[in-house]
Amino acid sequence: IEKFKRLKNEGNDFVKMGEYEEAANKYSECMKLNAEECTVYTNRALCYLKLYKYEEAKRDCDHVLQIEDSNVKAFYRRALAYKGLQVRKKNMAGI
């Protein structure tokens, strides 16, 4: 539990510094220790959104919503992921 908290806090610190790739890695390490903790998935989804990895963000949010079907952060971030995917699709169509 201590290692999990430490990794999660390190991830949170990386987010505050705008280091989203490093933060996502810390949250991924957390998931190896506890795959049921929804906050690390929604946190990693935030990182993926910032990195324009919309498919990965959507997948993390989908996972959370299977566990907690009323998780507001997961709904919100999944909506942002869908929006990002739509924009990307439109841009690809224009090329």
Image (tube, rainbow, N blue to C red):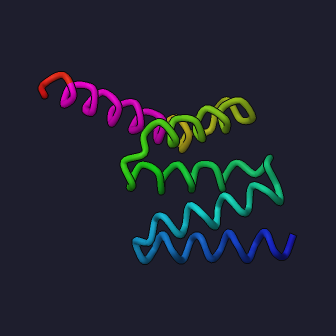
Left or right: 40 as drawn, with respect to 34: left
Count of numbered tags: 0
Relative placement, left or right, of 16 versus 35 is left
As drawn, 77 above or below 92? below
Q: Quick check: 55 left or right of 43?
A: left
- In this view of the protein, which residue sits in the foreground, 28 or 74? 28
**Camera-side residue of 77 and 57:** 57
Which quarter shows the N terminus? bottom right
Which secondary structure dominates the residues rendered in magenta?
helix
The answer to whether residue 51 is left or right of residue 38 is left
Name which residue lies at 72% across and 63% down: 29
Name which residue lies at 39% across and 54% down: 51
Residues in magenta, as a range: 76-92
Observer-nearest of 8 and 53: 53
Percent x, y of residue 14: 51, 74
Q: Position of residue 10 (x, y in %)?
A: 62, 76
Quadrant for residue 85, please give it. top left
Residue lying at the far front of the rendered structure? 95
Residue at 65% over, 74% down: 9
Q: Is residue 80 magenta?
A: yes
Q: Residue 61: x percent and y percent?
A: 58, 38
Residue located farthest toward the right when viewing the structure as drawn: 1
**Can you say whether 37 is above or below 94 in the image?**
below
Is 49 in the magenta? no
Q: Is residue 65 above or below residue 18?
A: above
Quadrant occupied by the C terminus: top left
Q: Residue furthest left?
A: 94
**Residue shown at 36%/48% (left/top)?**
52
